[in-house]
Image (cartoon, rainbow, N blue to C red):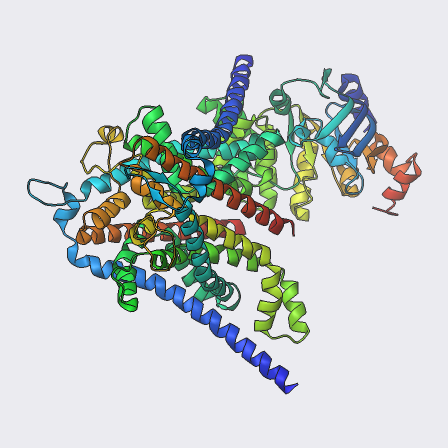
């Protein structure tokens, strides 16, 4: 584990968050967040619900742009580009920083069209290239075998777990560098959850993953780094092992040991 | 890839502006209607004099000494609308109560589309049936030389506003929380008492919206009324008088009008528009109040 | 106690019978209207009447031009109102980031919905026939109908836009799709049913409209092709019904037209009801 981390550190940070604040109207939702996210790692964001972890992750690909009356301060550098209040091309950013949502949200289209949606959005028209992308993405998301015979049937006919892996495949099809996962398993049964966790650990080879989770076992099982959020504060951030075995902050310890949450 | 992105951004900007323009065009249409009515409708009011125009009791637009008093039309429209509400409201209200609270699901599924059908029948068809059934009926019943007049118009209007009253009332009644009903039943009230003493009062702002909507429909209806009201420019002294409404006054002379007469017709439309704007204002107020509660 | 309970019984019986009687009257009314029109009109139906134009030479009447005019004007008005109405709904639901503009547009739509058709007819005559120089023509009529039906299309489209799950939009945005692409490829395809319902409701209103068309589309009974018809005057079925019944006293023709209109309303109503139920079921899924 430590070797792995050292490698990641050597490769540098893909996100550098410093003094980041966020308000919804008058509500100060995130206070002074500082965090470095390293490439080819899995970073888990944990904390009780309503603590700001989902809000935070949505700033890494500017999904918060969709919510009016949001005010931002501070800095989030992605690949040395400023994301906060800057006029970067969000479409390009979201191509590189993909997202998987809490509830599986396949579009009401065929399985093939779902996966091809992203590449088509970014200008891929060549049928052979699309076919290839779709197959590769489905394979990477470990769902190819289950759907290869019904590529043209509706994605809404899949089970919840399959839908979520389809959504991961959909996100992979645009060849992102980062994958943001917002409680991707909270709506799924344990078996599907296991499959997605396994998948996340495989994907780490090629992608950087930031995952919001309610489930501390999950964070412990799959992540390299863990960030503990509480009421809009980033209480503690560090290697997962350390957070779970020797937390520095009393509040982290209380949460980890299940004293609240 | 870069070129493709630039193109996408341009398309997006164009799309945004197209949709903004389409949205704003709606404002343009309303302004257009207001401005044209004002421009076309003001001159005659000024020439005749607002008091003489609004409160003059004689309309003789084609006489040698033309007179342009539209009080007969205003009063006819008001009486006609009140009459239609007096007949249509109880009928519609009790029907709505029946459909919302007493009918079984099956009955409701059959009758509701029938009410919709009533709303979908063109006004000329109502006028036509009125001409053939109602007018001779009134003539025979009351022994009159001609059955067309205020009463026939009132009945036709009452039927025409029925569907909107029923529809809006049902919505209002069904929006009353179930707890009210349960609370009342728990106190020993029977079902009918509960409906009329608890549910209906709770739905009153929605039901008044239904009334105002009906008023708006009735005052704006032209063709059906034109076919049964007789169309003489009389003061509405009796239910059997042949009368003209604001709408039919415009419609019946427009095609052959000229000069001041034509201008006066636009002024009538302007007065009608003023009525409608007031009614719409009240309606929106009631609907918003209903939503807030 | 017994007086009170008698009173309660009377109250209950009165209210109950009032509700039943009123419902019965309403239902009877609907049946009467339908049966009266169909029974009375059946003897007058003939293929000749339906398939020819009126001829002064032969002294015959045919309603084919009126049927065609109705179809033309509805088609043209729909072509005009659909982009306007759907576009406005999209602006209001998906784009609007200026509350003041949004409020102004909403207010105007409410106003449009309340304006009586005779006023649309007058303003249509002033603006389209005179100011824009279209003369009395089906195109002027269609433009008038377009404005009248904007609220219907806008409202139904807005309703169905609201039923599209936000997660679809998020998913598409998350893949880097820009707004118009999201709307075009994900949101609008989900709204087709709702928009079709709006169209059907509008077709019903357009078919039944007469006061707004008297002075904009006119009374002529000439049979034209679509493009010729657009810039010449023509009566729709409703206007023709008015003219035949009220001005010419030809009740036979009027009955046939009334029956056609009634049949069309029935068809439109049934279609709208079926569609609405389908949408309802979809929502329930």
Q: Quadrant of residue C4?
A: bottom right
Q: Residue furthest bottom?
A: C2
Q: Residue furthest top?
A: B3
Rendered location of residue A42, percent (x, y): 74, 30
Question: Where A222 falls versus B97 (above or below)?
Answer: above
Question: Where C37 falls versus B222 (above or below)?
Answer: below
Question: Where B46 falls versus A190 (above or below)?
Answer: above
For image coordinates 34% across by 45% down, the residue present is B248
Rendered location of residue B250, percent (x, y): 35, 41
Instruction: Report if residue C285 is visible in the image.
Output: no
Q: Depth check: C124 or A123 in front?
A: C124
Q: Residue furthest left?
A: C58
Q: In the figure, is residue A211 to the left or right of A161?
A: right
Instruction: Report if residue B186 is visible in the image.
Output: yes
Q: In the figure, is residue B11 to the left or right of A79?
A: left
Q: Depth check: B253 or C36 in front?
A: B253
For the image, the number of numbered tags is 0
For image coordinates 51% across by 33% down, the residue present is C90
Rendered location of residue B35, percent (x, y): 46, 29
Q: Depth check: B131 or A226 in front?
A: B131
Q: Residue furthest front?
A: B65
**Quadrant of the image containing the N terminus of chain C:** bottom right
Rendered location of residue C177, percent (x, y): 56, 26
Q: Quadrant of residue A118?
A: top right
């Amino acid at each position: 584990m430590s070797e792995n981390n050292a490698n990641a550190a050597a490769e540098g940070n893909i996100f550098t968050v410093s003094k980041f604040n966020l308000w919804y109207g008058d509500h100060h939702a995130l206070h002074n967040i500082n965090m470095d996210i390293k490439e080819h790692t899995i970073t888990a964001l944990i904390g009780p619900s309503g603590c700001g972890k989902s809000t935070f992750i949505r700033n890494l690909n500017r999904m918060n742009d969709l919510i009016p009356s949001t005010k931002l301060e501070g800095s989030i550098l992605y690949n040395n580009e400023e994301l906060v209040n800057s006029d970067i091309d969000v479409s390009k950013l979201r191509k590189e920083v993909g997202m998987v949502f809490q509830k599986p949200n396949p579009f009401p289209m065929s399985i093939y069209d779902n996966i091809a949606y992203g590449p088509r959005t970014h200008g891929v028209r060549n049928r052979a290239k699309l076919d290839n992308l779709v197959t590769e993405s489905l394979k990477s998301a470990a769902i190819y075998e289950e759907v290869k015979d019904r590529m043209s049937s509706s994605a809404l006919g899949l089970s919840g777990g399959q839908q979520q892996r389809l959504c991961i495949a959909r996100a992979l099809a645009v060849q992102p560098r980062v994958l943001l996962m917002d409680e991707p398993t909270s709506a799924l049964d344990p078996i599907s959850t296991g499959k997605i966790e396994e998948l996340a650990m495989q994907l780490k080879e090629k992608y950087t993953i930031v995952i919001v989770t309610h489930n501390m076992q999950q964070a412990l099982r799959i992540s390299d780094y863990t960030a503990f959020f509480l009421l809009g504060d980033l209480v503690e951030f560090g290697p997962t092992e350390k957070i779970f075995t020797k937390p520095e902050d009393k509040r982290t310890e209380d949460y980890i040991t299940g004293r609240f949450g | 890839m870069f070129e493709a992105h630039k193109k996408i951004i341009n398309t997006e900007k164009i799309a945004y502006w197209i949709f903004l323009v389409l949205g704003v065009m709606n404002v343009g249409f309303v302004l257009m209607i207001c401005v044209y009515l004002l421009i076309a409708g003001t001159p005659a009011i000024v020439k005749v004099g607002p008091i003489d125009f609004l409160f003059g009791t004689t309309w003789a637009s084609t006489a040698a000494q033309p007179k342009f008093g539209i009080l007969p039309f205003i009063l006819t429209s008001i009486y006609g609308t009140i009459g239609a509400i007096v007949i249509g409201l109880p009928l519609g209200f009790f029907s709505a109560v029946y459909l919302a609270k007493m009918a079984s699901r099956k009955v409701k599924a059959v009758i509701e589309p029938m009410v919709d059908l009533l709303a979908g029948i063109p006004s000329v068809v109502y006028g036509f049936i009125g001409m053939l059934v109602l007018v001779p009926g009134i003539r025979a019943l009351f022994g009159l030389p001609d059955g067309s007049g205020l009463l026939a118009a009132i009945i036709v209007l009452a039927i025409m506003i029925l569907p909107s009253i029923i529809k809006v009332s049902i919505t209002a009644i069904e929006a009353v929380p179930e707890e009210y009903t349960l609370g009342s039943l728990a106190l020993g009230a029977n079902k009918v008492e509960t409906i009329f003493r608890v549910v209906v009062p709770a739905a009153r702002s929605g039901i008044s919206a239904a009334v105002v909507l009906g008023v708006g429909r009735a005052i704006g209806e032209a063709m059906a009324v034109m076919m049964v009201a007789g169309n003489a420019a009389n003061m509405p002294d009796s239910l059997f008088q042949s009368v003209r409404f604001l709408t039919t006054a415009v419609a019946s002379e427009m095609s052959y009008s000229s000069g001041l007469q034509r201008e006066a017709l636009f002024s009538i439309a302007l007065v009608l528009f003023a009525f409608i704007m007031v009614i719409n204002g009240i309606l929106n107020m009631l609907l918003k109040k209903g939503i807030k509660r | 106690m017994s007086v009170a309970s008698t009173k309660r019984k009377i109250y209950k019986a009165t209210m109950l019978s009032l509700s039943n009687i009123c419902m019965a009257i309403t239902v009877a009314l609907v049946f009467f209207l339908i049966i009266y029109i169909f029974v009375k009109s059946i003897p007058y139906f003939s293929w000749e009447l339906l398939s020819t134009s009126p001829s002064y030479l032969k002294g015959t009447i045919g309603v084919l031009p009126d049927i065609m005019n109705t179809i033309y004007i509805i088609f043209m008005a729909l072509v005009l109102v659909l982009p306007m109405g759907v576009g406005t709904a999209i602006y209001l639901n998906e784009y609007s980031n200026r509350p003041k503009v949004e409020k102004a547009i909403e207010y105007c739509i409410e106003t449009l919905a309340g304006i009586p058709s005779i006023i649309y007819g007058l303003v249509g005559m002033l603006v389209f026939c005179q100011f824009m120089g279209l003369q009395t023509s089906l195109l002027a009529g269609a433009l008038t109908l377009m404005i009248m039906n904007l609220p219907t299309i806008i409202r139904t489209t807005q309703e169905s836009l609201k039923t599209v799950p936000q997660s679809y939009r998020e998913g598409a945005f998350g893949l880097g799709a820009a707004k118009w692409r999201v709307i075009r490829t994900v949101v609008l395809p989900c709204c087709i049913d709702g928009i079709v319902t709006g169209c059907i409701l509008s077709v019903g209103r357009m078919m039944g409209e007469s006061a707004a068309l008297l002075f904009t589309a006119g009374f002529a009974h000439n049979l034209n092709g679509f493009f010729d018809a657009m810039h010449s005057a023509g009566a729709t079925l409703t206007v023709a019904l008015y003219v035949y019944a009220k001005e010419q006293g030809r009740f036979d023709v009027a009955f046939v037209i009334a029956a056609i209109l009634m049949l069309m309303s029935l068809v439109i109503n049934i279609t709208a009801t079926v569609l609405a139920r389908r949408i309802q079921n979809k929502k329930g899924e």
